[in-house]
Amino acid sequence: MRVISVNISLKVGEIKNPVPKGRFLTDYGMEGDAHGGSGRQVSLLARESYEKSEKTASLPWGSYAENITTEGLPLHKLPVGTRMKIGTAELEVTQIGKRCHAGCAIRDLTGDCVMPLEGIFARVIRCGEILPGDSIEILPR
């Protein structure tokens, strides 16, 4: 269970681009990201979700507008309230899936989008940095 990419965008609704690291701020989200301060502070999606379709398996990380791309953890099966330590930050799962908005770039490109079913959202409980390669630890309740 690890991070394979940390991604950011300056505008809502845009594909996010990988960055070397992200700083995650308590009750805000990723510093500099368009979704910072919103109800869905941090978005996460697993590599395994990309691989469910041949059309999306080769897309670059961040294509679903996720802040953190992971591998080895079925994110969408985590219950709301699950806490995770990633890098030096601590996150709490607040939402599983979302409603896809009109004009979704991925849906237009591929005809489908896994984010509504398998993407998750979290809030930042403890600020810190997250880098590609960081392990993900599920914290006890």
Image: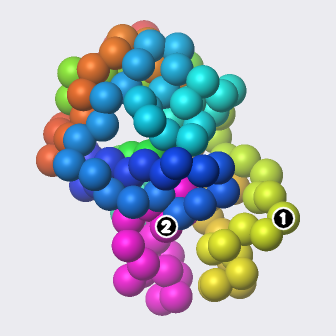
54 inside magenta stretch: yes
Q: Is residue 47 left or right of residue 13?
A: left
Q: Name the amino acid, label 1.
A: Ala
Contact between labelled residues 2 and 1, with CB atoms less than 8 Å apart: no
Q: Secondary structure at mark 2?
A: loop
Q: Is residue 85 left or right of residue 141?
A: left
For residue 83, say whether it is visible. no
- Here the colouring is rainbow
Q: Secondary structure at mark 1?
A: loop
Q: Is residue 103 left or right of residue 134?
A: right
Q: Position of residue 113 (x, y in %)?
A: 65, 69
Q: Main secondary structure of the magenta part?
A: loop
Query: Which span is picked out in magenta?
Result: 49-65
Whether 60 is drawn above or below 71: the answer is below
Q: Position of residue 55 (x, y in %)?
A: 52, 88
Whether 9 is drawn above or below 102: the answer is above
Q: Position of residue 21 (x, y in %)?
A: 23, 41
Q: Which mark is residue 102?
A: 1
Q: Residue at x 64, y 50 (%)?
A: 12
Q: Quadrant of the N terminus?
A: top left
Q: Quadrant of the C terminus?
A: top left
Q: Residue at x 57, y 41 (%)?
A: 34
Determine the image quadrant of residue 80.
top right
46 inside magenta stretch: no
Q: Name the amino acid, label 2.
A: Ser
Distance from Cα at disc 1 to Cα at disc 2 = 16 Å
Q: Residue furthest bottom?
A: 54
Q: How many callouts does the rendering have?
A: 2
Q: Considering depth in this image, is 50 or 10 the residue closer to the camera?
A: 10
Mark 2: few/some/many CA within 10 Å (<14, 14-19, 20+): some
Determine the image quadrant of residue 24.
top left
Q: Which residue is mark 2?
A: 63
